[in-house]
Amino acid sequence: MHKSEIIHSKILSQTDLDRWLAIARFKSRKIVFTNGCFDVLHRGHVDYLAAASELGDLLIIGLNTDESVRKVKGPSRPYLDEISRARILASLSFVSAVVLFNEDTPYNLIKHVEPDVLVKGGDYQPEEIVGYDLVAARGGKVIALGFTEGFSSSAVIGKITGNP
């Protein structure tokens, strides 16, 4: 299998996701879930995703579709289309799978995945993270990881556009 095909195989449809989850559960793999727009991937994202991947055996990323990014971030976003963003994320060796979701939040996707660990970055308290109730009720962990200082999408976009 060519590397491009390996990357593509990590981007899962709903049917692929169900099969992937069945295999992961059969093998008793610890699933870590996170989500985001990942519109302008930067070092802070990479540090965060690498740290998240260390919390279990498999890291699955719920990725906002273009439509849901516009709802969350405004009409000028995303800068990169959903397929490009998914391929970039899937190319990271520590990312096991990427699944697109079209809702404002990943609540229904988290309910479907039933991760063992739910992770978000930033300054969230675990109880504020979407899906906390679902994961906590199943005895899973909900973890808020910190930022890599000096790296944010807003800072990168500001630097590119000349509007720091």
Image (spheres, helix red, strand yellow):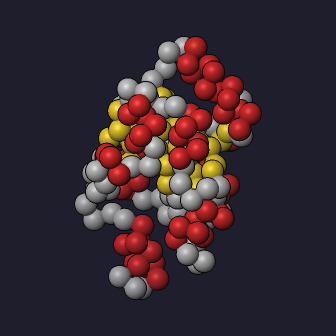
Q: Is residue 32 above or below residue 160?
A: above
The one of 150 and 138 positioned closer to us in this rendering: 138
The one of 79 and 22 positioned closer to us in this rendering: 22
Q: Is residue 96 left or right of residue 47?
A: right
Residue 164 x %, y %: 35, 82
Q: Is residue 24 above or below residue 163?
A: above
Choose top left, top right, bottom left or bottom right for residue 68: bottom right
Which residue is painted at 25% across and 60% down in the image? 149
Residue 61 x %, y %: 53, 43
Which residue is painted at 54% across and 49% down in the image? 106
Residue 6 x %, y %: 66, 35
For the view shown, which residue lies furthest in the bottom direction?
Answer: 162
Q: How many marks?
A: 0
Which residue is painted at 38% across and 33% down in the image? 136
For the view shown, which residue lies furthest in the top direction?
Answer: 27
Taking the image as drawn, is residue 24 in sight? yes
Q: Quadrant of the N terminus?
A: top right
Residue 82 x %, y %: 65, 58
The one of 39 and 134 positioned closer to us in this rendering: 134
Taking the image as drawn, is residue 91 in sight? no
Q: Is residue 4 above or below residue 44?
A: above
